[in-house]
Amino acid sequence: MTFTHRSLPRRAPGLSLAARVVVAAAVLASGSGCGEDIPDPTALPPSSLKLLRSFEYRNSVRDLFGGRAEVTAELPEDLVRANFSSISASMDCYDDVSVEQFEAIALEVAAQAFSKSPTPLDDHGCAPASVDDECVREFLGELGRRVWRRPLTDEEVNRYLFVVGNVEQLFEGDTVKGVELAVAGLLQSPNFLYRVELGRALEDDPEVRKYTDYEMASRLAYTLWETTPDDELLDAAEDGKLSSGRRIAQQVDRMLDDPRADAALARFWREHLNVDRLTLTNYPKPGATEDLYAAMRAEGRALAQQMIGPETDALDFLTTDRATLRPELADFYGLDPIAEETEVTMPAWRRGYLTSGLFLATNGHPDKTSPTRRGKFVVERILCGVVPPPPADVDLSLPTPPEGEATRREALEAHRDLDACRGCHEIMDPVGFSFEHFGPFGEYRELDNGLPVDASGEFRGQSFEDARELIPMLREAAGVSRCLVQHAYRNAIGQIETDAQLVNINDLTAVFEEEDGRVYRALVREIVSSDAFRYASGQLGGDDSSAEGE
């Protein structure tokens, strides 16, 4: 297993250079990370290393130390690829600056954990007089299994015992300080900072890699709980109970019944619907305020929570008449005043995500609407259509006509008459025009540039007058369920599927529509129990060796 970064800790406030070096020796020796019926390898995604996202890191620290420690420092930004941070986590590596950040954070976390009574050592019943006390080895092995999400080898435990012994000498026999810094070293290791889930080649078919029980514990925990595996998962892995689909399903049911699953399930919707991207920095608009944008984000988060209900039809996000609004957003929508955040019944002309301020504001220009962007979202995110990029030499600017001369729609239709523009705009604009009753960040209007709005159009041979008529058509359109499954699959696997993997999406869609009642929670259960989640074919940008034990 080849890792891409190796970095000695450069700054460790309060520690001597010698103390930092002995911790670094253990970190470097552990490597550094940038990795039933036998399924068809061509339909399997490759395995990969996955860096911990900021919320996963925070949750893991919280759960590893039982609330004794928390991360107060700023963590590296979670990047997004193909709409999901999970895909970025599979493809990216921490840079040197991030490695230095994690060094300082690990030292701070360990110091917090050991500064409060009872300490982690106390919990273990260990009051060591020296590094030679057997309970020190036992403690490092027990905590190490939880931190690295797999058992440490004897060599690895010895490496951290070496840290304890050296620090003990530097700090005048303070064994506890040595253990504290060994714990900091465990937290700096790539075995913690990355999810090392690479699988092992099957003897009967070396092209197929099966994730080990401990790797499955990690995959399930971070996919369903966004945190490190609990003891029950790790014990199941130790007993070999995460190798079969049936036993995995038992754990999945337990985990989905746990309240911790809600955050992970809702995060899919928040990323899929761009909930957290709506900020004044990203979308500056005349008249927009932080309070209004915060209210729009809150509406989106409430919708995400609504969509993860145990009996909720996932396609309700398009047509639901229920919304949770803050007073400023109710006023913005022109509804009856409310005194506090309240769930309300929305009027017929503003129902579901596509008529929310969140969607409309994140798919427009600062001072004018963008039927093209709104249509592109629908085509790509809801229908999974493909919109080709514009030719490099095309002028994308669209002058605003004088007041009363032409609407935005009329200006775009003239632009669409250009040969170089017609192909793309014919895909996006007819759907995008349906939202023209909503201004640049979602305010309802009857006039555009002083002229009556025309929001009519045609979708797959059916005519509509406006978004209110189009959206129910979208909900019932062929391929919409499959498109949602495709996005959920990408999010859970952390990769964009190849053409050969489409069979997995087709199979999941059939179950989603025919057996699961289009319930998103049930869809996630099917994905994490599937062969595509339990097996891999090769490694994403890696060699063919396992990192376990390194």
Image (cartoon, helix red, strand yellow):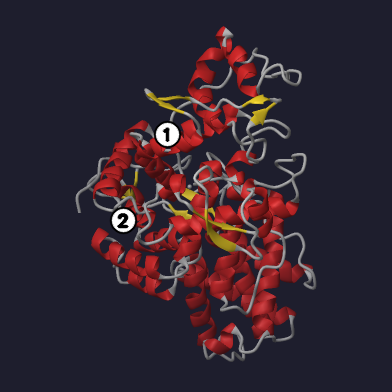
Q: Mark 1 points at which residue?
A: 383
Question: Residue 529 shows which numbered tag?
Answer: 2
Question: Distance of mark 1 from mark 2, alpha carbons?
Answer: 26 Å
From the top left corner, tell me how far across and down residue 21 is, in percent.
71, 65
Instruction: Tell me the residue at 51%/22% (across/down).
Output: 388
Depth check, mark 1 against mark 2: the one in front is 1
Residue 369 is left or right of residue 143, and the answer is: right
Q: In this orientation, does residue 220 appear?
A: yes
Instruction: Say which quarter of the image contains residue 215.
Output: bottom left
Residue that sits furthest to the top in the current view: 419
The foreground one among 538 and 109 is 109
For mark 2, give the secondary structure.
Answer: loop
Around disc 2, counting alpha carbons within 10 Å, would you say few (fewer than 14), some (14 to 19), or many (20 or more)?
A: many
From the top left corner, tell me how far across and down residue 473 is, in percent.
39, 35
Instruction: Tell me the residue at 33%/56% (across/down).
Output: 522
The foreground one among 131 and 201 is 201
Around disc 1, counting alpha carbons within 10 Å, would you say few (fewer than 14), some (14 to 19), or many (20 or more)?
A: many
The foreground one among 325 and 386 is 325
